[in-house]
Every structure is written in structure tokens, then in C-alpha cells.
């Protein structure tokens, strides 16, 4: 019998990606689910995805250096 997904406290896996929306689509195709919404603070786009096994995955698409105001 399969164990239920872990939705409690788990380590967060964090990754920098080139395309946060593309990474979300790939993870959803593999059974993951977006937690909340994609946020856009000054340093880039940030999202949290829950894996089918319940692990929380943090995605960061950093702002390109040339677009950061000085």
C-alpha cells in the first residue's frame, strides 16, 4: 500500500531556474502542484511547488543583472 503524501514539515529543496513558469509546468506534469501563487519581489520571481510525495520545492528565477536598477 502506498504511503500518503507528506504535507508536514519537510526540508525545502531550493532551485534557481531560468524560467519559473516553465519549471512549474514541468513539475505539474510530473504530479506536483503549485502552492499559492508566483510572487515577484524585486530580486526575481519566486514560487513554491509541492511534489507528489509532499516535499516543498522552492523555485527562484532571479532578475537579470542588467535589469537591476542602480
Image (tube, rainbow, N blue to C red):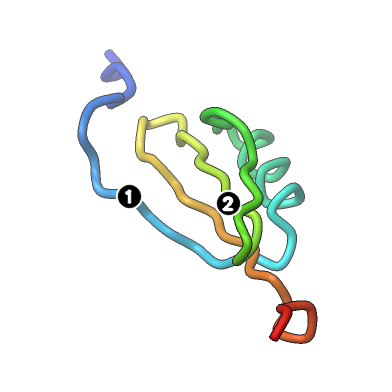
Extreme residue in the top direction: 1
Counting from the top left corner in percent of width and height, residue 42 is at 63, 62
**CB within 8 Å, label 2 to label 1:** no
Counting from the top left corner in percent of width and height, residue 34 is at 58, 31
Which numbered dot is residue 62?
none
Looking at the image, which residue is at 25% across and 48% down?
11
Looking at the image, which residue is at 35% across and 39% down?
55
Q: Helix, strand or loop at disc 1?
A: strand
Dividing the picture into quadrants, the one containing residue 59 is: bottom right
Rounded to the nearest whole Å, what is the CA distance between mark 2 and mark 1? 14 Å
Q: How many marks?
A: 2
Dividing the picture into quadrants, the one containing residue 64 is: bottom right
Residue nearer the viewer, 43 or 29: 43
Labels 2 and 1: the sequence-earlier one: 1
Please state if 45 lies on the left or on the right of 13 as rendered.
right
Residue nearer the viewer, 21 or 41: 41
Looking at the image, which residue is at 55% across and 33% down?
32
Q: Quadrant of the N terminus?
A: top left
Q: Which residue in the structure is indicated by mark 2?
A: 46
Extreme residue in the front direction: 70
Mark nearest the camera among 2 and 1 is 2
Q: Which residue in the structure is indicated by mark 1?
A: 12
Looking at the image, which residue is at 23% across and 27% down?
8
- Residue 7 vs 67, above or below: the answer is above
- Residue 57 vs 14, above or below: the answer is above
Near mark 1 (Cα within 10 A), the count class, few <14, some 14-19 or many ≥20, is few
Please state if 44 lies on the left or on the right of 55 as rendered.
right
Residue nearer the viewer, 1 or 44: 44
Counting from the top left corner in percent of width and height, residue 44 is at 64, 62
- Residue 44 vs 8, above or below: the answer is below
Dividing the picture into quadrants, the one containing residue 26 is: top right
Q: Quadrant of the C terminus?
A: bottom right
Amino acid at each position: 500500500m502506498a504511503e500518503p503524501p507528506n504535507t508536514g514539515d519537510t526540508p525545502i529543496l531550493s532551485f534557481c531556474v531560468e524560467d519559473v513558469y516553465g519549471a512549474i509546468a514541468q513539475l505539474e506534469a510530473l504530479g506536483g502542484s503549485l502552492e499559492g501563487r508566483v510572487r515577484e519581489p524585486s530580486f526575481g520571481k519566486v514560487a513554491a511547488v509541492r511534489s507528489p510525495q509532499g516535499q516543498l520545492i522552492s523555485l527562484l528565477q532571479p532578475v537579470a543583472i542588467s535589469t537591476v536598477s542602480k
